[in-house]
Image: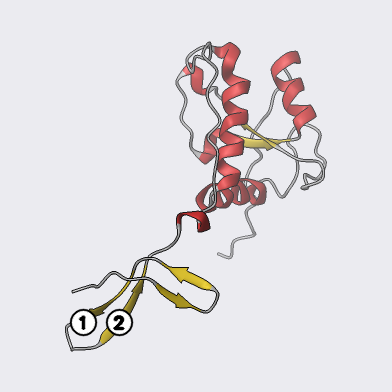
Amino acid sequence: MAQKYFTTLGNRHWVFHGQTIGAKGTVKEQYLLKASSVPIRRHTKIKVAANRFDPKWEVYFEERLGVKMETNLQGRRRLLYLWQTQDGLCPVCHQKMTHLTGWHNHHIVWRSLGSSDHADNRVLLHPHCHRQVHSQGVEAVKPRPHKGVRKA
């Protein structure tokens, strides 16, 4: 049974602290975290007029997806996978993409037109190239994967 009492451990003051007894009779110290130790992450609200099924809002939702992907580990892994399959090159201008140049996540077939969010439908583009794709109709093509020489 856990007991609740105030204790000091180093410089930290633990309000809820207790001991639990395990299955083999071992005593284990239990501490609850302070709410102040949890970082605050703000949620960006979606604009009221935004409609996921309207092609006018495709760029807005692609930018939101890019920000969301950079904030968690799974999203960063997906970005890294896309960057590696493209050899770090932008498919529009064929220049290197770095943290300095930045990148945007682009859907080849827009999600507002019913496509998927899988990696085979996405490419990474420079921000300037991404604007050109949407405003001037420049085509962004997914690069072919490199295949080595096979032995017979």
| Label 2 element class | strand
Few, some or many C-alpha atoms within 10 Å of disc 2 (few <14, some 14-19, many ≥20)?
few
**Where 98 falls versus 7 (above or below)?**
above
**Label 1 is placed on what type of residue?**
Gly
Q: In the image, is residue 29 above or below residue 124?
A: below
Relative to 31, say whether 59 is above or below. Answer: above
Residue under label 2: 28
Q: Residue at x 46, y 76 (%)?
A: 8
Residue 100 located left or right of residue 83: right
Q: Earlier in the sequence, mark 1 or mark 2?
A: 1
Name the residue located 53 percent from the left edge and 34 percent from the top edge: 43
Position of 14 compared to 102: left or right? left
Residues 52 and 3: in front is 3
Residue 13 showing in the rendered view = yes
Quadrant holding the C terminus: bottom right
- Give x and y (percent) for residue 23: 17, 83
Quick check: 2 left or right of 38? left
Amino acid carrying mark 2 in the image: Lys
Figure quadrant of residue 96: top right
Answer whether labels 1 and 2 touch (C-beta < 8 Å).
yes
Distance between the alpha carbons at the discs numbered 1 and 2: 7 Å
Residue 102: where, in percent of width, then height?
76, 40
Which residue was labeled with disc 1?
22
Note whether residue 107 is visible.
no
**Residue nearer the viewer, 13 or 142:** 13
| Protein image colouring | secondary structure
Which quarter of the figure has residue 95?
top right
Within 10 Å of disc 1 (Cα), the crowding (few <14, some 14-19, many 20+) is: few
Q: Position of residue 53 (x, y in %)?
A: 47, 14
> At which x and y percent is residue 109?
55, 24
Q: What secondary structure is marked by label 1?
A: loop
Q: Residue at x 54, y 22 (%)?
A: 110
